[in-house]
Amino acid sequence: MLPIVIQEITQAAPVSRSKASSLITAPTVSPSVLNTLNIPASISMRHFCEAKFSNICNTCRDSGQAAQTMANHLATLLIHAGEVTAGNNAKFEVVGNLTNHLLGNLTRDDLTKAQSAANQIKARFHSDIDSQGSTQLDRTLNMLDLPYHKATHESGRMGHAREMHSDVRHFFGNNPYQDLANTLAYCHDHVQIKDDHGMGVGNSLHWGLNEIATAAALATLASESGVDAAGQEALLKVAGAVIPAGTAFNFMPNVGGDGKPGLGTIIEGMLRGKTLPANLSESGREIIAMAYTLAICDTQRNNLAGLARPTDDVIFKNASAVHRLLSNCAEKEPESFGTTFFDNGKLSEAGLALCSKLTSTVEVFEEFPHHTFSTPNLENGKPNNPLSRTFDPGSMTTEERDNAILQLIRNNGSFGSANVARDIESFSGEFSHPVLDHIKQKTILENPKTAFTDAYIKFADELKFQCEAGKMRMDEVLDQIKAMGGSVQRRNQFRPM
């Protein structure tokens, strides 16, 4: 396989294609990296960007020029990944190599320039707000039309991107780089590679590429916003160090630092396994704090107190059947389930977090294929994910489908239910940071994995009982679970990046 050769565009503002053609260098990306990320060498990087990242390119005034700029930035990051060894761990090597290389080269000047670039993106793309309260970058993410990966719900409540922004802003407080961290959090999912059926396939076919390309997308949006070449490069490097390490999630080797595989991100593996680079600079420490905070807010936010949630009124109004199911569970076990998830008859903060967690479970599985490794296989080769948008309803009887959905819910309470405070404490001797200290103080539940696992099982059992009694319909409850999602924006809760 021949290495990809691309044109490098260094202008901050869009230029004509005839002018761009005279500004050529020839950086090359290792074939081992291209193979690992499943980027075909048969097409140019520009055409790959045009095909896979059209929502980013179409947000810019000249989509063709944006594709070329993004191709240049993407290749620059992939070159930092160096060479990787073929095999199951190659994809982790790509992100790990990229992270280690950038951590060793980032400076405080890079952070300052990157934050300035982020604020210019804010000024350019968050000033155009439509009648629904959505900004241009909200619409850029929402145009992907993925159930979970969105900035805002149709209800007007915050979607995942805005929740991430809100969470990170909450934890970064007075940190001098809070604007930069907020931007990286908000934009971390703006690239989502999809297949011909409109399903997200970045995590399965191109693991790590969504997140690396997101960094390239940010630098491209910076170019569109008039940021100079130095500012684009700084934002590219910072985003490339933070977003892939903090949000590319998988079942990885030694993520817990005990030699055993487990779910997590590269940054969690580095911290838990105590494999951070030696002699970290202050800028490197800021990068690690940003990456870890993104990792925690991305998958563990329902374990943390003080964050934006839907309210009890929202759940009661939009998901009365769900509220009733949870109330029934509380009535049956008032001293355990009841005291954990309710307070004076209303959902407590932990109860609201449980509702958010249920919503994300359903929405995430809608983006998975109808056969997935994330749930147990069923007999006779039948689909094991009937929540999928590609699910053929004729492939199962109604009873089989309902039972498969109940099994999916029962088995996923432990996902994203880590004891964050205990994790931070476990590596505090090797790495500490005021932002992580802030996170450590915000635990909702003493033992979240036990509490949420138990709650999912009890919720599924109660749902099964009510459906079999003819008092509820599965599809009605699923619709309500989705309708109750999204955090309510308190006054001044979300300020555009």
Image (tube, helix red, strand yellow):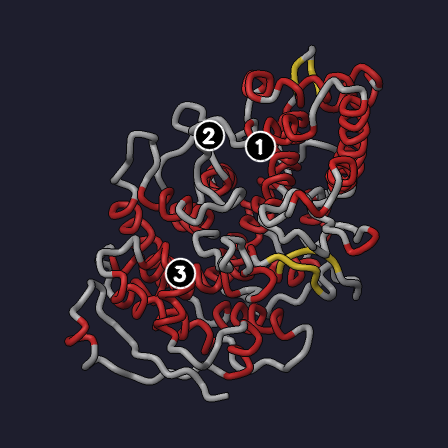
Q: Earlier in the sequence, mark 1 or mark 3?
A: 3
- Residue 459 lies left or right of residue 228; in this view the side is right
Q: Residue furthest front?
A: 394
Q: Measure the C-alpha gap from mark 1 to mark 3.
A: 27 Å
- Residue 157 lies left or right of residue 112; in this view the side is right
Residue at the location (50% across, 60% down)?
210
- Residue 143 lies left or right of residue 354; in this view the side is left
Q: Earlier in the sequence, mark 2 or mark 3?
A: 3
Amino acid residing under circle 3: Phe
Q: Is residue 270 above or below residue 397?
A: below
Front disc: 2 or 1: 1
**Residue in front for this viewpoint, 472 or 359:** 472
Q: Is residue 421 above or below residue 464?
A: below
Asked whether disc 2 touches disc 1, contact meaning CB atoms under 8 Å apart, the reply is no
Q: Secondary structure at mark 3?
A: loop
Q: Which residue is identified by label 3? A: 53
Amino acid residing under circle 2: Arg
Q: Is disc 1 surrounded by few (<14), some (14 to 19) or many (20+) residues within 10 Å?
A: many
Front disc: 2 or 3: 3
Amino acid residing under circle 1: Lys
* Image location of residue 83, percent across then percent down: 55, 82
Q: Which residue is identified by label 1? A: 482
Residue 330 appears in view:
yes
Q: Earlier in the sequence, mark 2 or mark 1?
A: 2
Q: Which residue is identified by label 2? A: 157
* Image location of residue 268, percent across then percent down: 64, 57
Residue at the location (36% across, 59% down)?
54
